[in-house]
Image (cartoon, coloured by chain):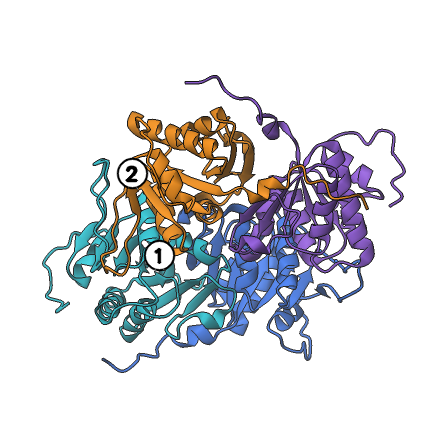
Chain colours: A purple, B blue, C cyan, D orange
Amino acid sequence: MRAYDLSQKNIRQKKMISVCCGAFPSDKEAELAYEVGREIGRRGAILVCGGLGGSMEAACRGSKEEGGMTIGIIPFYEKQAANEFIDIVIPTGLGHARNNIVAATGDGVIGVGGSWGTLSELSIAFKMGKPVVSLGGWDVKSPTGKDEGFVIVNTPYEAVSIALGEGTGQLRNEGA
Amino acid sequence: MRAYDLSQKNIRQKKMISVCCGAFPSDKEAELAYEVGREIGRRGAILVCGGLGGSMEAACRGSKEEGGMTIGIIPFYEKQAANEFIDIVIPTGLGHARNNIVAATGDGVIGVGGSWGTLSELSIAFKMGKPVVSLGGWDVKSPTGKDEGFVIVNTPYEAVSIALGEGTGQLRNEGA
Amino acid sequence: MRAYDLSQKNIRQKKMISVCCGAFPSDKEAELAYEVGREIGRRGAILVCGGLGGSMEAACRGSKEEGGMTIGIIPFYEKQAANEFIDIVIPTGLGHARNNIVAATGDGVIGVGGSWGTLSELSIAFKMGKPVVSLGGWDVKSPTGKDEGFVIVNTPYEAVSIALGEGTGQLRNEGA
Amino acid sequence: MRAYDLSQKNIRQKKMISVCCGAFPSDKEAELAYEVGREIGRRGAILVCGGLGGSMEAACRGSKEEGGMTIGIIPFYEKQAANEFIDIVIPTGLGHARNNIVAATGDGVIGVGGSWGTLSELSIAFKMGKPVVSLGGWDVKSPTGKDEGFVIVNTPYEAVSIALGEGTGQLRNEGA
């Protein structure tokens, strides 16, 4: 047996961040998603999302522009349904149930904007015990008061920092 | 071929209501779930839920006390994990993804209490276009203002009426 | 709290048998599926299947003619896609992955005919450790010789007996 | 907006091959899986599998030794359950239903050895219309005679060629 080629072993060591966002965003939501994608790319994390259009596509475009890697977990069997900025397409055929896999795959989860599919992903990710951050959309606190709910942030930089489990440190001005 | 035996055909004609609620409720949440179950049983609808304990069990107990039928869509493969008031156990083995099937199976969906799994089910049911009612827990309005969000009600009677797609008509005092 | 109404508690005590079969059967396959459904209905078991047309519909028709109960676990979200002989529709929206739930739900599993979806269901049911019977179709033995593979039978009566975990006893002539 | 960085766009252009094989293989099965993995790595395709141990691990080790990329679609939520040669872990939490995603993700599918989970994956991949090749295990022909069934091959080189949709051309001696 040959010596183990380490050339891509670092992929496994990269953090994954799931970006939950809508297919039919407002311009502002899409712009935020794009900036979140860029920030994820700059930080060297892998971007995971639902793989379709709208904010999902914007986030992936941002990540690819910064040299990042992107994974699209799509609800259909047809890989071509994924947006063009997806590197790895997982064609689940599971319909809405693919949202759970998007939530499960990220080491941290960022919601951008206010679609209901996004809320389902953030909720289940929160239940899974992951860091869940919300930007420009859902601000949901538990009615039971048992926990703090989503972390609400104002910039893509903060969102990515918290999703990565880092302190937010010195915040940069993202202009977002 | 024999004539078609109609004896159970009316099962298909019954409405199904999904009750989304937690496994570790407060006493008040469990009591509400029990009353929702009773109301569903009285109205002759089939109760669908995640099939486990806590509020799920309380709702099923209520339904069975009124002669209703109950379906438990559980996350495990082991049928015995379902509570004792479940008539039909669907052992999905899908983990959290079974929430989507709970949401999809109800013709209407009622959330009771404030757990995060409940919120994921209500959110995806709302996206699916079903009537979604919340009782004693989540009061979530879309940050985009594009829609009305969950219908917030105060009694099990109202909850079941709206989940059945009926006008609430003359509200009874449920004492709940 | 009222006394527990036992009127439908016996549903949970009934055995469930999953019938795996194709949507585009030959006449002979559909006839076999129909006879399997009748036998399941006569034995008082609940018939579980993929809920669509062809042999699935034939099996359900047979069961209903004998007063049985039927569950259709369909790949779509639209309940109306289920055949008319289904009592309880579970609209999973999971595509082919719903096959796993069909396999998991039966206490025993019967394959009728030779479609590839059927083989996927029988294989995974066998892996789950359930009794798996094949009638008029797949005769698959493990290439490893580690196990016996599917039980091949010649009549619906035998198929249902083995799926129920019973000895086949005195075989009736099914004319099948 | 910056110019689009193409540095990893070629990932999407790579073919994906799903390797379906068991967690508890014989030595011969594991060796075959390892050689299949090496061949996939040499051809520049991405290897997809169920991500756990046994033959799955052997195949991934082979691929990594040749500089390939590997994706593990695992049945659990815990990423650490994936073998150490997986680059991208998709923690579905779906139990056996994850087999369907393994089948769906490959552009072609190779079965190695004779486990029942493998057969379920090959069967559903065949139904999906993908090239399905079997090596050292299942030799299943449809009882209906409507199709040819799995392509049975003798070497990893042939297996990968057919899974890639290529003619097998001049066969190399793989010594496998």
Q: Is residue C7 above or below residue B83?
A: below
In what quadrant of the picture does the C terminus of chain D appear?
Answer: top left
Q: Residue at x 49, y 38 (%)?
A: D45
Q: Amino acid at mark 2?
A: Gly
Chain letter of the residue carrying label 1: C
Question: On the image, numbered disc 1 is attached to which residue?
Answer: C117
Q: Residues within 10 Å of mark 1 (few under 14, many from 20)?
A: many
| In the foreground, C129 or B32 | C129
Q: Residue furthest bottom?
A: B3
Residue D5 % position (x, y): 72, 40
Residue C165 % position (x, y): 23, 51
| In the foreground, A51 or C160 | A51
Q: Residue at x 48, y 56 (%)?
A: B72
Q: CA distance from mark 2 to mark 1?
A: 19 Å
Q: Residue at x 10, y 66 (%)?
A: C173
| In the foreground, C41 or B53 | C41
Q: Are marks 2 and 1 on the same chain?
A: no
Q: Which mark is residue B119?
A: none
The quadrant where residue C81 appears: bottom left
Question: On the image, numbered disc 2 is attached to which residue?
Answer: D114
Q: Amino acid at mark 1?
A: Gly
The quadrant where residue C27 appears: bottom left
Q: Is residue D47 visible?
A: yes
Residue A16 % position (x, y): 65, 36
Q: Is residue A162 visible?
A: no
Chain letter of the residue carrying label 2: D
Query: Element at badge 1?
Result: helix
| In the foreground, D42 or A176 | D42
